C-alpha cells in the first residue's frame, strides 16, 4: 500500500502529524505530559482538525489565548523548515522518497519570560 493511500489527507494538507507530546502539569499524568499517538494523527482528516492539533502543540490557549509566543516559535520553525526545503531542492546526489521531521521547542513558563 502506498503512503498516499494510507493517509489520503496528507496530500491535501502537505504533511501529517504522527503523534505529539505536550507538557501540561495539570493533566494528572505521572510525568506531566499529555500524549497523542499515531492513531490520533491518522484521525486528523480536515485542515481544521490539524490546525486545532497544532494550536494544542504550540500551547496557543495559554495566557487567555495570547498567541504571541507561538508566533515567535512558528517564525523560527518556518525559517528552519525553509532551509531544509532549500537543501532538498538543491540536492542532486541523493534521492529521497519520504522523510520525517521532529519538531521540538521549549514551552515552559520560564522560557516565556526570557
Image: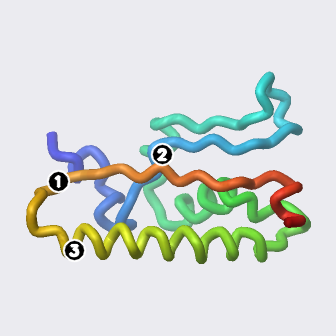
CA–CA distance between discs 1 and 3?
13 Å
Number of other residues with Cα within 10 Å of mark 2, as a class: few under 14, some 14 to 19, many 20 or more? some
**Mark 3 element type:** helix
The residue lying toward the viewer, choosing from 104 and 49, is 104
Q: Which residue is mark 1?
A: 97
**In the rendered view, does 25 fall on the left or right side of 92?**
right
As drawn, the label of residue 66 is none
Q: Indicate the position of residue 31 as horizontal and vertical percent values.
A: 77, 27
Q: Residue at x 36, y 67 (%)?
A: 84
Image quadrant holding the N terminus, namely: top left
Q: Indicate the position of residue 55 as horizontal and vertical percent values.
A: 67, 62
As drawn, the label of residue 41 is 2
CA–CA distance between discs 1 and 2?
20 Å
CA–CA distance between discs 2 and 3?
27 Å
Q: Residue at x 35, y 66 (%)?
A: 14
Q: Is residue 34 above or below residue 105?
A: above
The residue lying toward the viewer, choosing from 81 and 91, is 91
**In the rendered view, does 2 fall on the left or right side of 34?**
left
Q: How is the image coloured?
A: rainbow
Asked whether the beta carbons under mark 1 and mark 3 sit within 8 Å of each other, the answer is no
Q: Tag 3 or tag 2, which sits nearer the N-term?
A: 2
Q: Tag 2 or tag 1, which sits nearer the N-term?
A: 2
Q: Indicate the position of residue 2 as horizontal and vertical percent values.
A: 16, 45
- The image quarter containing residue 32 is top right
Q: Nearer the viewer, mark 1 or mark 2?
A: 1
Amino acid at each position: 500500500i502506498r503512503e498516499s493511500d494510507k493517509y489520503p489527507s496528507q496530500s491535501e494538507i502537505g504533511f501529517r502529524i504522527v503523534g505529539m507530546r505536550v507538557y501540561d502539569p495539570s493533566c494528572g499524568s505521572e510525568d506531566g505530559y499529555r500524549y497523542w499517538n499515531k492513531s490520533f494523527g491518522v484521525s486528523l482528516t480536515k485542515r481544521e482538525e490539524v490546525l486545532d492539533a497544532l494550536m494544542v502543540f504550540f500551547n496557543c490557549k495559554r495566557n487567555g489565548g495570547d498567541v504571541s509566543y507561538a508566533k515567535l516559535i512558528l517564525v523560527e520553525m518556518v525559517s528552519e523548515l525553509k532551509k531544509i526545503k532549500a537543501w532538498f531542492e538543491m540536492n542532486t546526489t541523493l534521492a529521497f522518497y519520504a522523510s520525517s521531521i521532529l519538531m521540538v521547542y521549549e514551552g515552559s513558563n520560564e522560557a516565556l519570560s526570557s
